[in-house]
Structures are given as structure tokens and as C-alpha cells.
Image: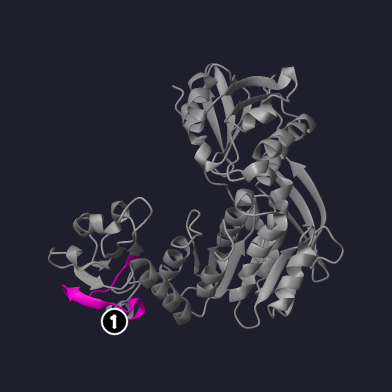
Amino acid sequence: MTSNILWQAEELINGLDGKLVAGELSAANGISIDSRDIKHGDAFFAIKGDSFDGHDYTDKAANNGAAVIVISDEKYITKKAGVATILVDDVLASLGRLGVAARKRTNAKIIAVTGSVGKTSTKEFLRACLMHCGKTHASIKSFNNHWGVPISLARMPKDTEFGIFEIGMSHLDEITPLVKMVMPNLAIITTIAPAHLGHFKDLEEIALAKSEIFDGLAKDGIAILNHDNEFFDYLKQKATAKGVRNIQSFGKANQADMQLVSAELLPNGSNVVARFGGAELEYFIGSAGMHQVQNSLGLLLAIGLMGVDLNEILPVLKTIELSDGRGARTEIAIKDGQIMLIDESYNANPASMVAAFSVLSAQMPKNGGRRVAIIGDMLELGAQSAEIHAALAKDIADAKIDVVFACGEDMKSCYNLLSIEKMGQYAQNSSLLAKSILENIYPNDVVMVKGSLGSKMSLIVNKIKNNK
């Protein structure tokens, strides 16, 4: 059967612009850059990373079932029978070429998502909604960088009807080459906020970097912007200057094309009323926080602009669950009762940290339980990092948070400004804080854990989950 074939043999080698140097030309059922995750019939790309060289794992990939090995060094030609080896000039560049070929061969409607906060959530919500409308493909996890975008594109089946791609950056000129591969029909910028600020001189330069997403819009493409963000006019000007004629917006503003009429924020989600095209939309989004309401407006605008009946989509928003590290909720047995764990351990910046405080503040613990924030350093904030962390103390004071446990050099600046009654414990790092955290949480607590990935807050999440 050919239904599982992603790339036919000739199509694959032509897309790679490579040369068969061993074995027989073979089709590929999938694309992988990790020999541990190879599935039978996949093509393995021996990418060279900062700390590894995929060429060292070609034999392992072949033994794990790869049908095709893509290399740039002839010393690594695979000897295993039944495995084709394709030689290219540069493995990552060849993966990019295959991604471009994948984009050219499909008639799918393509959406690209970027922004300082909410990229992954918006992408996942779009995936869940559009799956009800047709064959949908989306980048997995946070595959949004110089290798994540091409691999996500190369994995897109030819008969895809909707494609959703997350595009990230930490420097200027990163988004442009990626979006030129994706060539989206619609490009969403969720918001501009101080993330990766250490790599930029100010917020305007971050907005400039995000505006690169307009560089690759397909002909007659649509830009979708957050009308409530302070950089709306700036981004609109950038889009216009780059030849984008159709600019749509979402938010509270009366001029927004997808306008927020009202939002009732609840512990486990929000009741929302929005206005689009002269009609009112009423829905419940099953992810808490005003930031998720904003994300829902942007994604619904995109879906509506593709001609999909939004009334068919709205019920899906009620059922969406957030993933581990990005707001997933888990009830965990602990001591003589249970706690609710909100896992925000994957990433953090000032905007997402404040949003997480808002979600925690809205929770209603039972029988004397507390709202507990366990927070670690927000990274890549540059020279202003300590000052930015210190500013969180006011946000915590304004929220209904009962006690705070903190770790990290910069988060100490925040912790030291908290009122005595909110001070739980401070430790130099997450590993040290994890050692004592179980002694400090009690039945009926609602516990939110958040910090940048490099702060390793997942150590604390795992300690809580495996408390037995």
C-alpha cells in the first residue's frame, strides 16, 4: 500500500537535490533527525548541531528502521542492506529544500504564527479546530527554529488541506528565511512583549524582528495583528510597506475585525462574546486566562477569513487541553489529600509570567487550600533582568496568591520584595528547591510552577508528580 508514503523515491531525491551513493532509491514514510525516534521506512537526516553530529548516528538510524540516510560526508555511507544513502552538499540545507518542495506541491491553506507569547497555544488551538474541517498538518511541540520549520514543512503530506506553522526567533533576520519557506496565506502575530530582550536593544526591535513574517506572505496573503498591543500601528505600517494589502485585527478595540465584546474569566476557562462580520459569537474556551481569550480571537479570525463556518468550530474550543509545561492541569494525590498542579514549566517571560499569576489568582481552592506560585528565573532578558524580575513583586501583590516559592539568581530580586506572609522559601536553583518542596505544599493547594526552560522547573514538577 502507498497510503503511508510521504515522499516517493524520485520526488525525494529531486527535492533534496542529492545523489544516491549506496543502496536502491527508496521512498520515505516520514522524516526524522533523531535516530532514537526513527520509525520503519523513515528518512534520517544527519544534521550537525552545536553539540552533536547526526553523522555519528547513521548506523543506529539504519538499525532502527530508516529506509533512507541523508549525509554530507561520504565517510558515513551506510553499509546496511536495504537502506539507501543520499549524499548532499549540506544536510540542513537539503532539508530546507525538501521543505520548500513540500510547500510547492500542496494546495493547502497555510497559516504561520509568531509573537512573543502564545505562539504554541495558538498553533495547537488552530490544529484542534481545523482538524474538524479537513486534513490538517501542524508543527509539533515548539519546532519553530532553523531546523524545526524545515522539518515540519518536509513532513507535510501532499494532500494536506490546512497547514499551521509556528515561527520563532531570538535575533533579527531569523524569521525571514523561515517564512519564505512556509509562504503562508495568513500570518498571525499574537503580541509583542519583552521576550529574548537580552538579544535586542528594546521592544521596538523585537517588533521589527516579528514583522519579518510579512516577508514570505503568499500573493494576496493576509496579516492578522493584535489591535490591543502597543505595536499595532507599527506592525501595520511594516506590513503595508512590505506590500501586504489585507491587514486584519483582533482585540477589544472597536476597530478590530474580530472584536471582543465581553469575557467572563473563570477558574477553568472563559465565557466569551465576540463580534465578527456583523454577527456575535458566543463560546467557552476551556483554557483559563485573558491571554487565552486573546489567542482565541486571533485564531478564530484566521479561520473565519478562510471561509470556515465559525459556528461549527466554536464547540471545539471548550474541549482543548493544554500540554505539559504549557498550562496542563493535573490532580495529584499528596499526603492525606489532593492538590491541583498547573504546569507552566516550559517557558517564561514577563508577559507570560503575569498571565500565569492571573490564572492562579482566579482559582478557588477548596477547604483552606492555598494559591501557591513556584517560580524560577526568566532567561535572556539582558542587563535589565534583575529589574524586570523585581517588578513581578507588584504583580504578585496585586494577585490573589497566598505563598511564593522562588529560585534563581534574578528571581531573588522579586522574592526579597514580597510581603512576609507571601514568602514561602527561596533557593539558588530549582534542584535545591525541589528537595524541600513536598514539605511545603498541602492538601487542597493549587500549585502553579513556572520558569524558563533553562531554569529547569520541570525538576519541581516531576518531584511533585512522583511524590510517593
> Residue flagged by tag 1: what amino acid is it?
Glu
Let me know if residue 7 is in the magenta part.
no
Badge count: 1
Which residue is pictured at 28% across the width and 55% down the height? 35
Q: Residue at x 75, y 70 (%)?
A: 236
Q: Position of residue 101 (x, y in %)?
A: 42, 78
Q: Is residue 148 above or below residue 244?
A: above
Give the residues in magenta: 14-30
26 falls in the magenta region = yes
Along the line of sight, the residue nearer the viewer: 166 or 464: 166
Instruction: Report the side of 325 relative to 307 (left or right).
Output: left
Question: Above or below — where is 382 with respect to 103?
Answer: above
In the image, 198 versus 3, the foreground residue is 198
Q: Is residue 462 above or below residue 368?
A: below
Q: Is residue 165 left or right of residue 276?
A: left
Residue corresponding to mark 1? 10
Instruction: Say which residue appears at 64% left-offset and 58% top-offset.
Output: 115
Within the image, what quadrant is residue 73 found in? Answer: bottom left
At horizontal 45% and vertical 76% (from top left) the residue drawn is 100
Residue 339 seen from this side:
yes
* Local secondary structure at mark 1: helix
Q: Where does residue 243 sit, x and y in percent of width and height?
A: 69, 81
**In x, y percent, where is residue 305?**
69, 73
Quadrant in the picture for the C terminus = top left
Q: Nearer the viewer, residue 100 or 48?
A: 48
- Image coordinates of residue 466 in percent, x first then y, are 44, 27
- Which image quarter holds the N terminus? bottom left
